[in-house]
Image (cartoon, helix red, strand yellow):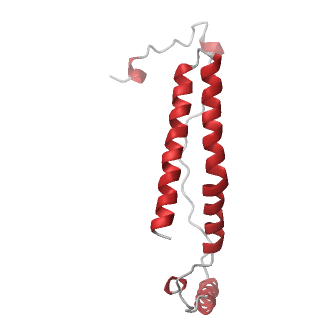
Amino acid sequence: MSHHLSAVPLLADSKFAANLLQIPPLSNRPIRKPTARIKNGSRKSACKFLISCLAASLLTLRPATCHAAVARMPWDPMLLALQDMLVNTVAPAAIGFAFAGSVVLYALGGYDKQAGRLFGSGLGGCIVLAVVHLLNYVLP
């Protein structure tokens, strides 16, 4: 049984009946049909616009030489310069900071776990840097 049907109705002479709001009954308004129809002229203008956009896109997207057929991509010099900078300057500095930080943490005492992790990250960085140098030597 739903909650609405199980509710006890209030009597009209009760002292609470005067304080209740009067809710007007719900009315279902009929749905009006649109009076204006879509004209064929607007469809024709939309079709013309679509055809002109399609023609413009076909003209701008004409075939060009493929960069993949060339041995060098246009962005290769920038990426090689970034790789050289990371391998030659940034990575050794980060490894040095990791070792120095682990020594400082170990010297202060009480930070043995963090010092061990920082030393491990420095050691891992050394191994990775050695592998990168080896790969650059083997596969130039």
Q: Where is residue 42 shown, x and y percent of the image?
A: 64, 83
Q: Residue at x 55, y 43 (%)?
A: 27
In the depicted view, which residue is nearer to us: 135 or 39?
135
Q: Where is residue 15 shown, x and y percent of the image?
A: 61, 6
**With 134 as the anchor, is 79 left or right in this view?**
right
Number of on-image labels: 0
**With 6 as the anchor, is 102 left or right in this view?**
right
Q: Where is residue 20 shown, x and y percent of the image?
A: 62, 18
Q: Outermost residue toward the left?
A: 1
- As displayed, is residue 12 above or below residue 26? above
- As displayed, is residue 120 above or below residue 9? below
Q: Residue at x 55, y 84 (%)?
A: 67
Quarter of image, res 118: top right
For the N terminus, give its image quadrant. top left
- As displayed, is residue 1 above or below residue 18? below
Quarter of image, res 5: top left
In the depicted view, which residue is nearer to us: 76 or 112?
112
Q: Outermost residue toward the top?
A: 15
Q: Residue at x 56, y 65 (%)?
A: 33
